[in-house]
Image (tube, helix red, strand yellow):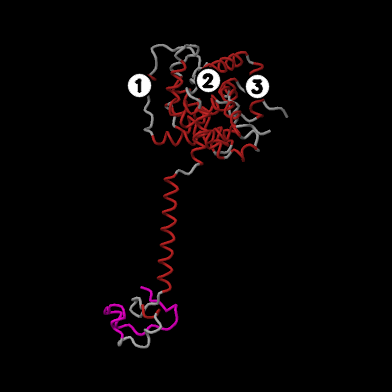
């Protein structure tokens, strides 16, 4: 069954979309068939095509003044080179990270007492035997460390979660 | 066939610059964005050199994103006073037409402006436009149609032969 011919008003309304290739193939075919048989719509389509190409061609842009390709290559090359300042910053940052890792490791390894204070004698083999007699060799006493029980002899002492 | 950077620039450089100048309305600023587009091409040259036919849409996509980013940082365009209808309509052959088209395009929102320029001035197909704007093909057609209709509305008072 063939499709009915397109009325003039519908064809006219579809001319802009036909020029811009916005119609589905079947719709485009119907418009084309109408335009082929209608002098008014054919003239309308030609006028629109002329206006479209004149408007689109009317706005020219001056080419860039310099050699943008050369400048793009220079920027690309510069982006691949690490500047001395950046290298220094990277070095400082890596040292800081190493230092932070060391501090964390040390805090993990140092056993803590019941009050959460660091019990330094745990690392000393003599500390458990005579804590009171060697008060002058021990860490300066603080209220919490003096009340803490003797540190266990193992290295990874249980830690309180504060 | 692999293309050297010089060949790629020779083929697309001027078009990318013109697109950015039209999109942003700033020819000098467009030079900077155009350079950035090609720096990004150089950063992806290996992947792109094996994808013949995709270089132009890829460049336009990067340029569009850079241009839209630049536009978002600027104040929205106010309708220029002198786009008010003229005393009598002019014909599209009139030398002042280019300036009126430029002003009218500047009144479109950035997304519509990009769609219109890519299709009407740079000849992208709708599948390419869809790729550049990250839309479906239907979405790309709808956006282009909205831009075109808005421009026709803005320019109709100026051009008696725009809508025969």
Mark 2 secondary-structure assignment? helix
Drawn side of residue A48 relative to residue A130, left or right: right
Residue at screen point 52% across, 31% down: B115
Q: How would you rate the neighbour count of disc 2 (Cα within 10 Å): few for under 14, some for 14-19, many for 20 or more?
A: some
Residue B3 falls in which quadrant of the image? top right
Residue at screen point 38% across, 32% down: B76
Of residue B26 and residue B148, the one placed in the foreground of this image is B26
Q: Which mark is residue B81?
A: 1
- Pointer 3 and pointer 1 on the same chain: no
**Mark 2 or mark 3, earlier in chain:** 3
Chain to which mark 3 belongs = A
Write the start and end of the magenta stretch as one range.
A134-162
Residue at screen point 64% across, 26% down: A28
Cα–Cα span, label 2 and label 1? 23 Å
- Pointer 2 and pointer 1 on the same chain: no
B139 lies above or below B25: below
Residue A46 falls in which quadrant of the image? top right
- State the residue position of label 2: A56
Q: Nearer the viewer, mark 2 or mark 3?
A: 2
């Amino acid at each position: 069954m063939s499709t009915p011919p397109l009325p003039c008003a519908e064809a006219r309304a579809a001319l802009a979309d036909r020029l811009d290739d916005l119609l589905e193939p079947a719709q485009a075919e119907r418009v084309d068939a109408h335009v082929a048989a209608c002098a008014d719509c054919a003239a309308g389509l030609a006028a629109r095509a002329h206006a479209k190409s004149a408007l689109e061609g009317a706005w020219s842009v001056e080419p860039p003044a310099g050699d943008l390709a050369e400048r793009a290559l220079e920027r690309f090359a510069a982006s691949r080179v690490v500047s001395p300042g950046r290298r220094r910053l990277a070095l400082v940052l890596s040292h800081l990270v190493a230092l932070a890792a060391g501090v964390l490791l040390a805090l993990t390894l140092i056993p803590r007492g019941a009050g959460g204070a660091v019990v330094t004698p745990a690392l000393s083999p003599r500390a458990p035997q005579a804590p009171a007699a060697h008060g002058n060799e021990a860490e300066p006493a603080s209220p919490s460390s003096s009340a803490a029980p003797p540190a266990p002899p193992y290295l990874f002492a249980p830690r309180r979660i504060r | 066939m692999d293309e050297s950077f010089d060949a790629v620039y020779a083929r697309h450089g001027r078009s990318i610059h013109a697109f950015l100048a039209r999109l942003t309305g700033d020819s000098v600023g467009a030079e900077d964005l155009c350079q950035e587009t090609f720096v990004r091409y150089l950063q992806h040259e290996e992947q792109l050199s094996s994808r013949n036919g995709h270089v132009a849409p890829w460049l336009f996509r990067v340029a569009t994103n850079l241009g839209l980013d630049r536009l978002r940082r600027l104040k929205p365009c106010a309708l220029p006073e002198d786009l008010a209808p003229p005393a009598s309509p002019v014909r599209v052959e009139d030398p002042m037409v280019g300036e009126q088209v430029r002003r009218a395009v500047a009144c479109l929102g950035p997304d519509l402006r990009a769609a219109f320029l890519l299709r009407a001035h740079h000849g992208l197909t709708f599948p390419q436009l869809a790729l550049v704007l990250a839309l479906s093909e239907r979405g790309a057609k709808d956006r282009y149609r909205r831009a075109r209709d808005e421009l026709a509305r803005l320019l109709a008072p100026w051009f008696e032969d725009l809508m025969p």
